[in-house]
Amino acid sequence: MKKSNEKLELNEEVKINEKIEDSKKALVFDVKRFAVHDGAGLRTTVFFKGCPLRCKWCQNPEGLSAKKRPIYFKNSCIHCRICEKVSKENQIEYRDDRPYFNLDYKEGFDNLIKACPSGAIRYDSKEYVVEELLEKIKEDQVFFRNDGGVTFSGGEPLMQGEFLVEILKRCKEEGIHTAIETTMFAPLEIIEKVLPYLDLIYIDLKVFDEKLHEECTGVSSKVIKEHIKYVLESNHRDKVIIRTPLIPTMTATDENIRSIAEFLVGVYPEVRYELLNYNPLAPSKYELVDLEYGLDEDYKMFGKDEMQHFYDIVEQVGLKNLIIE
């Protein structure tokens, strides 16, 4: 039985053409209103479920799986054990005074969710059709003035590429500014389809060295760099902001930042580039989804002088549009 407290494995097979099975529906694990860090102005950020990467420091572990899964909120649980009473064979294992879900169970977990009197068992995501998600986005359209809009994030939104194309088209028809946060680890034909409907493109380039990138994320950076080069050599290049999350001992090294900056200078020196400080709050999410955080130590955000050190490296290499907050 594959239980929901399985360790987050980095060596599982991932494929660039992995995608959600039903392209007419999107699997969304959160819709965040009034976001201010996912593009200009006030934004609604839609978090698509499923990601082909397995970053050791993943900020949204609830979005990793491409399937709708049950999650357990221990602070809501009243330990009535009703879930155990109504569960079907091989659906859960009740131990340590809580349920553990068999993630290989094929018939869903609706019975547990309906029976739980305190709401401690819920699904981690919701399905949307295009028009339903569009209406959800349009609820905040009045706040999209002054450069606001919608940002599609994840997970990896390109895993639901066909749906993404359709919702982007509808957003543009409604005059809504569109952005994406992506790794570009996706089939090129999907990337080509979404580019015309995007106003802003955030691309993560985490680790330049291909072997080290695979050790940290489960996949090589080779395809990611090829797709970044493709976009930066296209007429969409001025929409792009490249981001590197600064992860202690992994991405936040002089060699890595210098290599990324040199690569970008060689492709398009005018590209905007942003270094994202480490987020020490991410590990708190892992308990919710019964996964283990991939970093061993309790690291803190980088200080002002440490951030300036990385900025200096980028500027010395010759990138002209470094974003500093």
Image: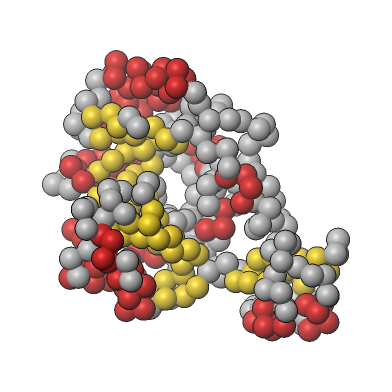
- Which residue does the image show at 27% across and 48% down from the upper left? 40
Residue 37 visible in the picture: yes
Above or below: residue 122 compared with residue 87: above
Q: Nearer the viewer, residue 202 or 302?
A: 302
Q: Quadrant of the N terminus?
A: bottom right
Tell whether 210 sits left or right of 98.
left
**Outermost residue, left side:** 235
Q: Quadrant of the C terminus?
A: top left
x, y percent for residue 265: 24, 27
Above or below: residue 280 compared with residue 259: below
x, y percent for residue 296: 68, 34
- Which residue does the image show at 71% across and 74% down from the upper left? 118
Q: Nearer the viewer, residue 43 or 220?
A: 43
Above or below: residue 65 compared with residue 278: below
Q: Quadrant of residue 254?
A: top left
Tell whether 26 sits left or right of 97.
left
Above or below: residue 320 compared with residue 292: above
Q: How many marks?
A: 0
Q: Nearer the viewer, residue 87 or 73?
A: 73
- Which residue does the image show at 46% across and 33% down from the upper left? 277
x, y percent for residue 44: 36, 60
x, y percent for residue 211: 49, 33
Q: Quadrant of residue 216?
A: top right
